[in-house]
Amino acid sequence: MIQMLNRVSRFFNPLQSTTGAGQADIPQAFMHPGYSENMHAASGQKSPVSSREQSLTSSSQKTRVTSSEQSPDSSGGKSADPSAGKKSRMETRDLTVTYGTTIGVKEVSIPIYDKEVLALIGPSGCGKTTYLRALNRMHDLTRIAKVTGQVLLDGKDIYHKDVNPVNIRRRIGMVFQKPTPFPTMSIYDNVIAGLKLVGIRKKSLLDEVCERALTQAALFDEVKDRLKQPGSELSGGQQQRLSIARALAVDPEVLLMDEPTSSLDPQSTNRIEELIHTLKDHVTIVIVTHNMQQAARISDRTAFFYVGNLIEVGATNDLFTKPKQNQTEAYISGRFG
Ligand SMILES: Nc1ncnc2c1ncn2[C@@H]1O[C@H](COP(=O)(O)OP(=O)(O)O)[C@@H](O)[C@H]1O
Ligand SMILES: [Mg+2]
């Protein structure tokens, strides 16, 4: 089973060179646009991973009081910190990402609570995508990017040298800004592509996963009678839900979404927002959005970034109604950005 999951996860990082299924085995269609910029970097991949590396290893690095151990926000009523009493599922500590001399994000410490929606907001270029990509080690694939600090998943550092990044990317899935259906594949094949790629052929299992993932992505009813038609024939909003279904097919614990509705019409945006609302019963979601109304509608907590710094993070209601920092106030009232 573990071996199967590892093979599934390889699909989510087709550039990972591992025993049995190297890059040459992967059809070009599987080259996710989100990875394409990093294809060159991938040629410098590390050596194959052993099964020993499948489990996360405890971080032996510095410890200090984490936000999850601190008392929750003291504000009451609806604005009370939605993290109250919750354990952090992930956490970044002093996370810094640089691209050569350019700082992407600097010393960002945020706890991410189980089954919450955390929104990342801020003006263009402030480091939202950089932060998001650090959460599932996507920067490993960018030669120029350097990551320091810690990213913990269930208290264990995902950047520890013994951790297999491919396994991390299976547990922490990602949905990109543009819908990314594999154009030559049917809707059905798009959803179960990861499973099929690793040799799972049992039709009943594939059917089951397909229906489950499409249902979770709120797309099943719309496509159930045309599963064999190409995914590229769907509307933009449906394609984005198809991309979400594909991400969900391998049961991620955390879902990272980078402006998933920025290219969608209002109706499709609504569907995705409703979907996020439902999904958080099962998964922890971190979503980048440049749309403050969207952050207000869908998130439990919001983090505001400005030129690579985390300015403020807290309950969404609080951040939008009584921001603690002047820069947050200026941004949410539209004075810049
Ligand atoms: N691959 C890269 N190479 C060099 N600089 C980058 C790269 N990606 C992002 N940056 C820089 O990092 C900073 C943060 O970018 P980004 O995280 O994409 O911001 P946002 O998603 O908030 O618009 C910007 O200055 C951007 O130019
Ligand atoms: Mg971005």
Image (cartoon, helix red, strand yellow):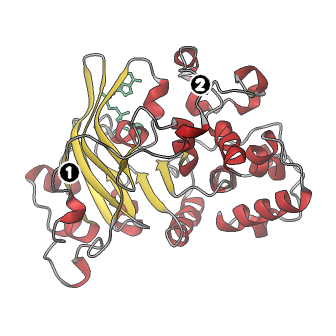
At x 70%, y 40%, the residue is 7
Front residue of this view, candidates 190 and 7:
7
Front residue of this view, candidates 301 and 329:
301
- Residue extending farthest front: 52
Q: Which residue is mark 1?
A: 331
- Up-down relation of residue 332 to residue 4 (above or below): below
Q: State the SS at label 1.
A: helix
Three-letter residue code for mark 2:
Ser
Q: Which mark is residue 188?
A: none
Instruction: Describe residue 248's horizontal placement relative to residue 70 as left or right.
Output: right
- Of the 4 image quadrants, the one containing the C terminus is top left
Q: State the SS at label 2.
A: helix
Rendering coords of residue 107 (x, y %): 20, 38
Instruction: Describe residue 126's horizontal placement relative to residue 282 as left or right.
Output: left
Q: Are marks 2 and 1 in contact (CB under 8 Å)?
A: no
At x 75%, y 20%, the residue is 24
- Up-down relation of residue 321 to residue 325 (above or below): below
